[in-house]
Image (tube, rainbow, N blue to C red):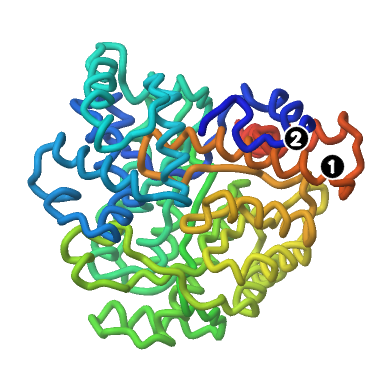
Amino acid sequence: MLCDDYLLATATSRQLYQAVATLPVIDWHNHLSIEELRTDRHYPTLTDLWITPDPYKHRAMRICGVPERLITGDADNYEKFLAWSATLAQLTGNPLQPWSALELARVFGITRELTPDTAEGIWHEAQDIIAQPTFSLHSLLKRFNVIYAAPCIPAGDDPTALASIDWAKPSLRGDDATTPTADTLERYSRLTGIAMESFAAYAEAVRQRIEAFHRAGCRFADHAIDDGFCYIHDGREEESFQRLRTGEVLSSENRHRLFSAILRVMATEYAHRNWVLQLHIGALRDTSSRLRRLVGSAGGFAGIGRPCDIASIAALLDDLESRAGGLPQTILYALNPADSAPLAVLSGSFPGDGTPGKVQLGPAWWYCDHLYGLRDGFETIAAYGVLSVFVGMTTDSRCPLSFVRHEYFRRAFCGWLGEKVEAGVYPNDFTRLQQVAVAVCGGNAAKMVQEREGT
C-alpha cells in the first residue's frame, strides 16, 4: 500500500510532493502529554507509545466488539497489542489503516501489514527499537522533523512546564475558564489572589492567567464551541455570574451568556497580545454516560453535533472586531461537514488589513480528518476562500506517532492539486503551484509562528 507514490497519482502530484516532503513540521495544536514532554519519556512497550494514548484506536476497537479489558482495562500490554492488530485487519477504508501503516514504516521501518499473523514478529521488531536508550519522545519528534509543537495546557494549569524545551510552547486551552465551576473560581482565586466576588474580578483573574501563559511563550489558544452554542451579549453577565457563585445550577441561557462574556474577554486579550484564536465548532460531548464514567471525558466517544448557529459565530466575530476591543487571527474548525462552507464564506467577512487569512477555515478536524475530509476541505477553501493563505495541517492528537499525519496531509494535498492541474481545472504553472504547495504544507504555518516570536 505504501509505495513511494502513495496518494500521488499524477506526475504533477509527484513533482509537487518532492518540493514539500522534507519541510519542517509546525504543529500548533495538539494534545501531547505535558508530563511526557517535560520528562522526555522513554516508553516501555509499543502499546504504551501507540495504543494507550490514542482514543481513535480505542473507538475502533469498541466498534469491533473488543472487550474493554483489552482496550483500557487490566489486560497486559501484549494482549492489548494483539487485540489492536486483530481490529486493524478489519478496518478497510478507515483512516486508521493507512495511518498505522505509515507509523510503523516511518518509525520502525516495518512495511509488512499488521495482522494477527504478523503481530508477534512486528511486536518484537518494534520492542527492539523502543528499548534502545536513544529512543524517547523528543527523539521521535525530531525524527518527524518537528521544529515547533504547541500542546494544550488548561488555563488553570502551569504554563511553564515546558520551559526547558525550546521547540515546545504551551497553547492555552480555555474551556475551564469559559465554563467555570465553583472549583474553577476557587482555583483561579488561589492562583491570582483575587476574591471572586464579581464578574469583573473573575475577568481580571482570567487576564492574569493569560498573561502568565504569554510570559511562558504561549501564542495560541483554543476554545470549544460545542453543539447548541448560542451567542448572547445583553449586559447581564454579572447576574449569571452571581448565580454561579452562589451555587445555582445555571439555565442554558445563563450558561451561554456567561460563556459568551468570558470568551469576549479572553479573545480581546489574545488580540492585544497577537495570539491566534482557534474555535473548535460542533462537538456533541455528552453521548454515552457509561463510557464517560469508564474512561473520562476524552475517551473517544463524542459525536458530531447539529450544524452550528452561523449567526452566533458571526455575532461573536463582529463583536470582537467592532465592540470588544479587537479580533485576533482566528482559525475555525468545523466538525459537522455541513458547517464547512458557511464558515469558509463567513471568514471572508472579517479580513485583516495587511493580514492574509486573518479568519479562515482550519484543516479537517477529528472525525473529518481522513482522505475524503481533507480533500473536501481543500475544495471548500479553494471555492469559498483563498487556498494559498490556508495554514495547513496540525495533528490535534494525543498519540506521539500521529505526527506522521503531516506526511499524509502533504501527500493528500499534492495528490489533489496535481489531479486538478492534469484534468485541466487549474492552470499548469508549476512555479506557482509549487509556491502554493509549500505555503500550505508548512510555509504559512511557519510564518504564523514567526510573526509572533518576540511579541
Where is residue 408 shown, x and y percent of the image?
Answer: 56, 37
Q: Is residue 206 left or right of residue 328?
A: left
The structure residue drawn at horizontal position 61% and vertical position 55%, both measured from the top left corner, is 331
Closer mark to the observer between disc 1 and disc 2: 2
Q: Is residue 365 left or right of residue 293?
A: right
Name the image quarter holding residue 383.
Answer: bottom right
Q: Quadrant of the C terminus?
A: top right
Where is residue 86 shown, x and y percent of the image?
Answer: 26, 44
Where 452 falls versus 45 (above or below)?
below
Task: Tell which residue pokes out farthest to the top in this image.
Answer: 133
- The residue lying toward the viewer, choosing from 27 and 1, is 1
Q: Element under label 2?
A: loop
Q: Is residue 164 left or right of residue 52?
A: right
The structure residue drawn at horizontal position 31% and vertical position 79%, both measured from the top left corner, is 244
Name the image quarter holding residue 382.
Answer: bottom right
Residue on which disc 2 sits: 10
Residue on which disc 1 sits: 421
Where 350 falls versus 275 (above or below)?
below
Looking at marks 1 and 2 on the same chain, the residue that comes earlier in the sequence is marked by 2
Identity, as a three-letter code, of the amino acid under mark 1: Val
The structure residue drawn at horizontal position 55% and vertical position 79%, both measured from the top left corner, is 231
The structure residue drawn at horizontal position 22% and vertical position 66%, both measured from the top left corner, is 292
Where 310 falls versus 76 (above or below)?
below
Residue 455 visible in the shown view: no
The image's mark for residue 387 is: none
Residue 103 visible in the shown view: yes
Q: Are marks 1 and 2 in contact (CB under 8 Å)?
A: yes
Q: How packed is label 2: few (under 14 Cα within 10 Å), some, or many (20 or more)? A: some
Q: How packed is label 1: few (under 14 Cα within 10 Å), some, or many (20 or more)? A: some
Identity, as a three-letter code, of the amino acid under mark 2: Thr
